[in-house]
Image (cartoon, rainbow, N blue to C red):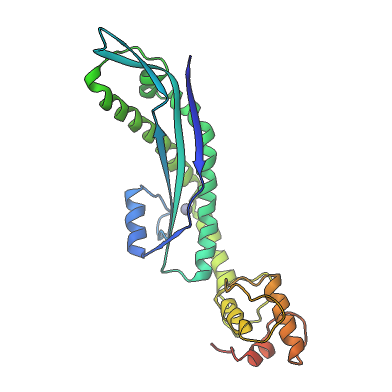
Amino acid sequence: MPLTILTSETPPGAPSFDSPATIAALAASNGSAVPAGATVVGITIPVLAHDFTALNFHTRNSGTEFRFNTGTLSLTLRQEVHVSNGLGPCARTVWLQHENLHLADNSRLLSDLDRELRADAVFASFLVTPVAWHPRSDFASVQSQIAARIGAVFTRLTNAAAVRRDSAGEYRRVERQIRARCGHSLDNVLRRGEYGQGIDILQLALNNEPSILPRLAVDGVYGPRTEARVIEYQRNNGLEDDGVAGPDTQDSLGITGL
Ligand SMILES: [Zn+2]
């Protein structure tokens, strides 16, 4: 029976918001490659766990030597996302969208792992086409060598994917998005489809007003529920009910210049 390699993924947990110093330390210890001059504000860390319990081995010389021959190697990917807490809520949202691209890149690499591991000469010599016999006393050490090869192969793949993703062009795109979405002040007109810190203040103010609609999540996203609350507020207060929070609506809510 040949070796079977099974891969699976545990969904990533909630992102962790850490200090800029922690983010820099994580980036350094995980070999993060960002464009020259750029600051790392977010990092996705893929961790690949292995389970050797369904691998089979055979022995010779009265059990004093062994080698793996068949069985199933199970590999489980779990990813962690860290974003700097130095960013405002709006910029965090945009950065998390960038980190989601890394999450997807790394998930896709799982389907290459079978081929890449079998192509690795050291891995293959232990598990795919085993030739050498090992002393029984090396059982733990052989397993750690296999684990190290799996880690090295996967890290090579994920690092290459991260370098491709974190191009100077991608960083410019993310920075443009942050400027476009998060640069509002409350002097601006706020409308559906926008993101930003002014919008969370608008949502807080609307939640203090009488309404027959559900309370708004204060998430800084001007979606249909926020628009509906704005229209309702405008109608209740004799304003033009266009669903756009311009200067008159903001004045009336008492949030101008906040
Ligand atoms: Zn990145």
**Where, by quadrant of the figure, is residue 135 drawn?**
top left
Q: Which percent across, then down, holds residue 232?
A: 74, 83
Can the viewer see residue 163?
A: no
Is 178 displayed left or right of 16 in the figure? Answer: right
**Count of marks, rendered view:** 0
Q: Residue at x 48, y 57 (%)?
A: 14
Is 110 displayed left or right of 148 in the figure? Answer: right
**Where, by quadrant of the figure, is residue 111 drawn?**
top right
Q: Which percent across, then down, holds residue 123?
A: 38, 24
Q: Nearer the viewer, residue 127 or 42?
A: 127
> Height in image: 242 above or below 171?
below
Q: Which percent across, then down, holds residue 80?
A: 44, 51
Can the viewer see residue 159?
A: yes
Is 87 displayed left or right of 247 in the figure? Answer: left
Q: Nearer the viewer, residue 151 or 204?
A: 204
> Height in image: 169 above or below 153?
below
Q: Which percent across, then down, holds residue 172?
A: 52, 60
> Height in image: 156 above or below 166?
above
Q: Residue at x 46, y 58 (%)?
A: 15
Q: Nearer the viewer, residue 166 or 10?
A: 10
